[in-house]
């Protein structure tokens, strides 16, 4: 007998949305404000190469989550730019919170489906978080009035990878 139903978040409950353009623009402005005058194209090239770590395989990182601080550090390393830990924290929080300014849309019928299923089953959510941490995703789900439906939420992250 089925007692619980687990849902994945991305492209199951909410429509996947890229925040790369906004993240790149915010990072560019942040670096400019701190006297790191590089061209936008230089930053974009480093961002494209290192932020998403497309050249790294899951096996190489032992299937670990790649945290935002590490992604930013990789981009800055590529550009030979050094910033303080405090500044790294500021830009990390800014890039992670972008989703709150323009949240991804719920897929059609999700709220009604979850509400109906919750009448008979325990409902859970599992998600890898990418750049946006669970605390931000929870705020988005709360805005759509569905966070309280989930009896169990699992954010898939493992220890940070080291340089």
Image: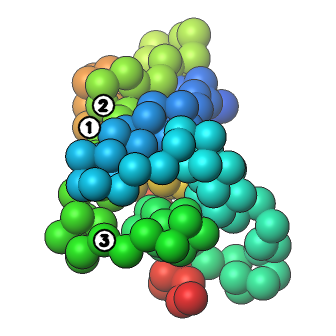
Left or right, 76 with respect to 48, comes to: left
The disc label shown at residue 139, or none:
1
Q: Is 15 on the left-hand or right-hand side of 35?
A: right
Query: Do labels 2 and 1 touch, CB within 8 Å?
Result: yes
The residue drawn where x is 37% and y is 74% is: 82
Give the percent coordinates (x, y) of residue 117: 50, 28
The residue indicated by pointer 3 is 83
Q: Which of marks 2 and 1 is nearer the N terminus?
A: 2
Q: Which of marks 2 and 1 is in front?
A: 2
Residue depth check, mark 3 versus mark 2: number of the one nearer the observer: 3
Q: Nearer the viewer, mark 1 or mark 3?
A: 3
Whole-angstrom CA distance, mark 1 to mark 3, is: 29 Å
Q: Where is residue 32 in the image (x, y as percent from the top left)?
A: 32, 46
Residue occupying image coordinates x 39% and y 24%:
103
Numbered label attached to residue 100: 2
Q: How crowded is mark 3: few (under 14 residues within 10 Å), some or many (20 or more)?
A: few
Q: Which colour scheme is used?
A: rainbow
> Residue, x 38% and y 33% (percent of image)?
99
Q: Are marks 3 and 2 in contact (CB under 8 Å)?
A: no
Q: Which mark is residue 152?
A: none
Q: Give coordinates of residue 56: x percent, y percent.
A: 77, 72
SS of the residue at dot 2? helix
């Amino acid at each position: 007998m089925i007692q619980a139903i687990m849902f994945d978040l991305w492209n199951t409950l909410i429509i996947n949305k890229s925040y790369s353009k906004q993240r790149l623009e915010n990072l560019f402005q942040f670096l400019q404000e701190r006297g790191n005058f590089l061209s936008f194209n230089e930053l974009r090239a480093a961002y494209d190469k290192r932020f998403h770590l497309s050249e790294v395989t899951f096996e190489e990182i032992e299937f670990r989550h790649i945290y935002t601080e590490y992604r930013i550090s990789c981009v800055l390393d590529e550009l030979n730019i050094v910033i303080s830990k405090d500044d790294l924290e500021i830009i990390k929080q800014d890039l992670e919170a972008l989703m709150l300014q323009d949240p991804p849309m719920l897929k059609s019928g999700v709220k009604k489906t979850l509400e109906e299923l919750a009448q008979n089953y325990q409902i859970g959510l599992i998600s890898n978080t990418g750049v946006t941490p669970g605390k931000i995703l929870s705020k988005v789900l709360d805005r759509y009035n569905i966070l309280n439906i989930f009896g169990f939420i699992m954010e898939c992250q493992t220890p940070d990878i080291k340089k």
